[in-house]
Amino acid sequence: MGERTPLALLSGPASGRMAVGEAITNIAAADVNKIGDIKLSANWMAAAGHPGEDAVLYDTVRAVGEQLCPALGIAIPVGKDSVSMKTRWAADGGRGTQEVVAPVSLIVSAFAVVDDVRRTLTPQLQSLPGDSSALFLLDLANGAARVGGSALAQAHQQTQGAPPDLDDPALVRAFFAAVRAASRAGVLAAYHDRSDGGLLTTVVEMAIAGRRTVHLDLAAAVARAPAGTSPLEVAFAEELGAVVQVARADVDKFREMLRAHGLPDAAVVEIGTVRDPAKGARAELVLQCGAGAAPLLRSYVGDLAKVWYETSYRMAALRDDPECAAEEFEGVYDEADPGLGAQLTFAFPRPDAGVPDANSVPRALAANPRRPRVAILREQGVNGQVEMAAGFVRAGFDAVDVHMTDLLAGRVDLRQFRGLAAVGGFSYGDVLGAGEGWAKSILFHAPTRQAFADFFARADTFAFGVCNGCQMLSTLKELIPGAEGWPRFVRNRSEQFEARFVPVAIPGAADGRPTTRSVILGPMAGSRLPISTAHGEGRAIFPDAPDQQAAAAALYAAGQVALQYVDNHGQPTQRYPFNPNGSVAAIAGVCSADGRVTIIMPHPERVHRWFINSYVPPAIRDAVTAAQAVHAVGSDDEQTALDEGPWAMLFHNARRWADSVPDLSTAAA
């Protein structure tokens, strides 16, 4: 994404060019083959008819569409506009008027095919071999440090001054090619584009993400700037460019690669060093201008993180549940927090992953080539059916798309299936109580109600519900043997839709808790790992229980808690946002008494391949790297096996269980 609307107060064309430039420096972190593969969507907004604004819009469109994008070799195949960005109303009892006029705005969305999502760069500073690593500024402004329209200028209520601009399209093209080549060569450990807030803010964000000590020296950048430019302007100018982390051993190779792709040496400015904090010490950020000079800024990274986050906290406290906002802010940068990790009690990758002649079905199941049928059940508005089907197919199931209308009309018979998976998404737009409206379509339709009751009663079936599917199945508990004590899932404590990546644990003996009876999660008991969540109504409560904690304790004691929210130390928690919905006793999912029916709020189907997780803990990445180093991957099936993440085991566990129980389905007969 790229947007530089404040610059339009100073120069419409500059704001348009910078929006395109920011979108390019953003998408450069992804493994896009070449800059010409990028397509742009341009969202134009203007106050048409207001004096001077039509001319500014014309000049900006011409600067972007006729001049800049052709020079970059990038097309704009799609866009939209809103030319009514002005409002006027009567004031002073009708004796006068007030009006608000928005400046010309261009919001640019860049999109492209990504060759390999595993090569995506992030701002997280890494721990690299050697005493320290280097930070480089890749400067696309030829040393300029224009602060007009910047966050610094706005903070000081100044609107004048020269705005940043994209002056050299050829330099941007060279930058993109050089960054992608260096990334594919493995010499870039971290990447962050320089935009909002300028160079100092960029480095602070990288230090926060990586929890590393950074010594930032602006001397070389100031020397490159025009005469009279102050360190303050260099630190906060929102010019185009990027900051990258490079291991000391790779610096020469890095410089050679950039030079070979046309990025001049002058544009590659070493600005600092990155070190791991000493054991027991706090990460620091030190800013200076010249070796031996007194620091311009010296602060702990954790303190900077709280300053960086405070505005968001104040907004959240007004908009959301204030207690949730306070809990999240208190934990913004906990020095004792080990971070999002993983601790697995099962073999990962699978022992047969990547071995010659292996396919997506574990070798232990090869003796039974028949693929059990699982119904991927969906309703109007849900959106998780493709990912859910993919997980089951890779584990050796025959996944069948089944819409509720198929069951209600009698076109599909549940007796043909061994498994049923109710997927997530906004069933009925969530207007009927999320998954509860879905459940009522079953409960109040006699033939369908009986079909589900018969399915749950069979000893050879399993069912799995996620998100809205979890809510739906929980509402069907009167049809499910051994589900009498299940909770109901209601509106989140935060009063917000929670889309997060959180740590969860599967109760088991390894952590001293009663092992879950879930047939699909039980073999993973005692494990802790992150998972995707996305729901507005996921708070588990026991509406009929006089004592909420006692009702939850009974489920734990019976082994019917299948999943629980934990903090980064692995302890069950009520604290937001680790417990994103405020569920009683940290319950994230439950199962029936015999373990055949499992319902959870988080989304394992969205993260069953390791590289599509929004963050990959080192333990998981290291395990995959080690397996790939051992196995020579030759076929697509072998690669698929090595690409599986820990959550793929849930689907394989379902297949193992299905093979261990005689098939009583109509299809088997």
Image (tube, helix red, strand yellow):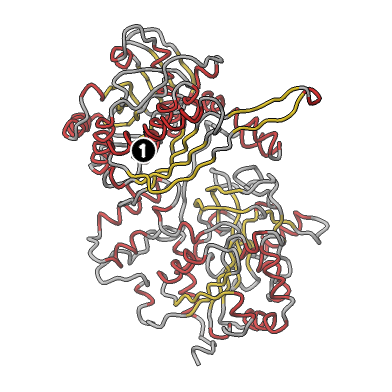
Q: Who is closer to the viewer here, 333 or 18?
A: 18
Looking at this rendering, what residue extends furthest in the right direction? 546
Where in the figure is residue 467, as x and y percent of width and height? 60, 60
Q: Who is closer to the viewer here, 91 or 119?
A: 91
| Secondary structure type for disc 1 | helix
Where in the figure is residue 620, as x and y percent of width and height? 40, 51
Where in the figure is residue 383, as x and y percent of width and height? 54, 62
Residue marked by disc 1: 65
Three-letter amino acid code at disc 1? Gly
Q: Who is closer to the viewer here, 84 or 617?
A: 84
Please say if 296 is above or below 650. above
The quadrant in which residue 355 appears is: bottom left
Observer able to see residue 277 = no
Observer able to see residue 404 = yes
Compared across the picture, whether 319 is left or right of 637 comes to right
**The N terminus - image quarter:** top left
The quadrant in which residue 320 appears is: top right
Where in the figure is residue 101, as x and y percent of width and height? 59, 28
